Image: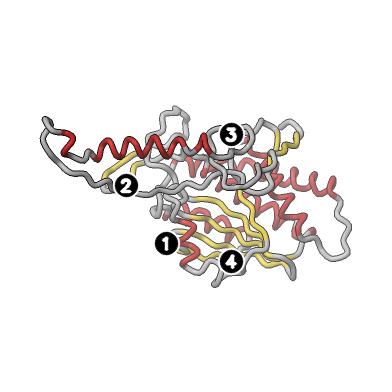
Amino acid sequence: MTRFVRPLLASVALCGLLSPPAHAELDVARLKQTIEASFESEYPKLDALYKDIHAHPEVAYQEVKTAAKLAAEMRAIGFEVTEHVGKTGLVAIYRNGDGPTIMVRTELDALPMEEKTGLPYASRDKQIWQGRETFVAHSCGHDIHMASWVGTAKTLVGIKDQWHGTLMFIAQPAEEEVTGAKAMIDDGLFTRFPKPDAGFALHDGSGAYGSVTYRVGVGSSNVDGLFIRFVGRGGHGAIPQATIDPVMMASRFVVDVQSVISRKRTRPNSASSLSARSTPAPPATSFPTRPG
């Protein structure tokens, strides 16, 4: 988990810098030292929380124990917590005077797959998913995101004299099924609670170790699904010309759709991604951080 310390601290600093008290001179170097000291003192607890969540994952809309665990952590820090937003989601609010509302998001769910890492805290839990029993594992980093989310909350509350405003920490269910965000919005995320002025989330990616990367504009693609039915017409194998073969139709469709990628403008250094922008997105920029 230590390799995620720098992204966590970066998100904390960004949130804290957005809303300093009026007329205050922000000592960035001192603030950085305070944040790092806070994180180092809390790290053993956060590492234990990460390993606990990793060992006991839950799939979409079944994150009951995970959500309860995070709710308890946030209440202990001093947040007002509302549970069961979008089924199993959480909204935690911390008010610190007038100022912008800053949203920090994590995900709750794991994947229906077996973990084979051999780690002492590896998941051996099972749940019912799509009508069958399956192993469950945190294979997409949501366990790290949750521990970092709690650590960010603790750090920001610890330096509340450095900023004014409202913190809105949300824990989203069913991110792997894509539907969790909509479930929270449909349940009044932005009507029952303050509408954020800025939002932050931690995501592990392919950036170099020891660096923080950002991109202006769209940074990654959206994942969604659709179902297409091809209707054919049966017949005898001796006269295929009198039939309409849906397998051939579907096969041709896959090839035609894939060929769209090579006929559209793509982002720089990304031959396999489809961009809807009329001009290429600016390249990502990385800043080296102090070795951990």
Q: Residues within 10 Å of mark 3 (few under 14, many from 20)?
A: few
Q: Front-most of 18 and 258?
A: 258
Q: Which mark is residue 80?
A: 4
Q: What separation in Å lies between label 1 and label 3 (alpha carbons)? A: 37 Å
Q: Residue at x 61, y 69 (%)?
A: 194
Q: Residues within 10 Å of mark 4 (few under 14, many from 20)?
A: some
- Say above or below: 55 vs 77: above
Q: What residue is pinned by disc 1?
A: 87
Q: What residue is pinned by disc 3?
A: 270
The image quadrant where one finds the C terminus is top right
Question: Cβ–Cβ below 8 Å for labels 4 and 2?
Answer: no
Residue 34 percent across, percent down from the top left = 78, 47
Q: Which mark is residue 138?
A: none
Q: Which mark is residue 129?
A: 2
In this rendering, the label closer to the viewer, 4 or 2: 2
- Lower sequence index among marks 4 and 2: 4
- Lower sequence index among marks 1 and 3: 1
In this rendering, the label closer to the viewer, 1 or 3: 3
Local SS, label 3: loop
